[in-house]
């Protein structure tokens, strides 16, 4: 498991007693279920490890040292907007021709929803998996996404499975951009001084 970007949450290890089994039991309450034919999206926890011979591994948590790994899976069916626009246009033209009037925006919106509902069973879901882990010794929850919205969504699903999850995002003393700018300017100044 290699995380390209991450979101970090803090917790007090003495207030959150976690083991591989207790986390797995909690995540089982929000286990991933594939999209149903009329669902546009489905999400939940899956195994962070591959199974043997293409079968899914049933373990929802895996511990190595103080780290307990997990994986969060999302299936999304993408509705092609161009197809929706075309079908709504066709249906609207038929209705306008038969009734001799322009459709109201609320009626067009309803047509759009009907078209999407009709297309949903024909669509194939695209899966994405986000990995993360709890460092139970140092009190960190690390989630492999740079998106704070996605990280908070995953944390809320963990919270839903556990009943509560007392985590906070760490606060930094100065903005990250300022810290990185200072770091780069120090590197440049140091390398210029070394060249002289």
Image: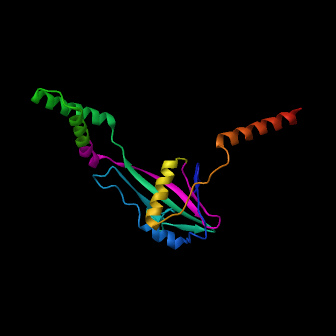
Residue in the foreground of this view, choosing between 99 and 118 = 99
Q: Give coordinates of residue 147: x percent, y percent.
A: 52, 47
Residue furthest front as drawn: 173
Q: Give coordinates of residue 46: x percent, y percent.
A: 45, 62
Q: What residue sits 34% from the left and 55% below the top?
A: 35
Q: Is residue 83 magenta?
A: no
Q: What residue sits 28% from the left and 53% below the top?
A: 37
Q: Is residue 132 magenta?
A: yes
Does any portion of residue 26 appear in the rendered image? yes
Q: Is residue 75 left or right of residue 90?
A: right
Identify whether 89 is placed above or below 53. above
Residue furthest right as drawn: 196
Q: Is residue 190 left or right of residue 48?
A: right
Q: Give coordinates of residue 73: x percent, y percent.
A: 44, 56
Residue in the foreground of this view, choosing between 20 and 7 = 7
Q: Give coordinates of residue 120: x percent, y percent.
A: 28, 47
Q: What residue sits 20% from the left and 36% below the top?
A: 107
Q: Quadrant of residue 194?
A: top right
Q: What residue sits 49% from the left and 53% below the top?
A: 152
Identify whether 85 is placed above or below 60. above
Q: How has the structure been colored for display?
A: rainbow
Q: Which residues are magenta?
A: 116-145
Does any portion of residue 46 appear in the rendered image? no
Quadrant housing the N terminus: bottom right
Q: Is residue 63 left or right of residue 28?
A: right
Quadrant housing the C terminus: top right
């Amino acid at each position: 498991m290699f995380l390209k970007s991450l979101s970090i949450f803090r917790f007090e290890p003495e207030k959150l007693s976690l083991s591989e089994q207790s986390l797995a039991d909690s995540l089982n309450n929000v286990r991933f279920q594939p999209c149903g034919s009329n669902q546009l999206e489905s999400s939940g926890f899956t195994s962070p490890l591959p199974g043997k011979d293409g079968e899914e591994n049933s373990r929802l948590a895996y511990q190595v040292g103080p780290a307990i790994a997990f994986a969060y899976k999302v299936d999304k069916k993408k509705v092609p907007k161009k197809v929706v626009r075309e079908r709504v246009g066709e249906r609207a033209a038929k209705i306008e021709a038969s009734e001799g009037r322009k459709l109201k925006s609320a009626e067009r919106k309803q047509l759009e929803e009907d078209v999407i509902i009709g297309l949903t069973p024909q669509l194939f879901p695209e899966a994405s998996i986000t990995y993360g882990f709890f460092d139970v010794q140092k009190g960190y929850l690390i989630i492999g996404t740079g998106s704070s919205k996605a990280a908070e969504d995953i944390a809320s699903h963990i919270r839903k499975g556990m009943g509560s999850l007392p985590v906070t995002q760490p606060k930094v003393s100065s903005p990250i951009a300022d810290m990185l700018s200072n770091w780069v300017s120090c590197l440049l100044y140091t390398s210029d001084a070394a060249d002289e």
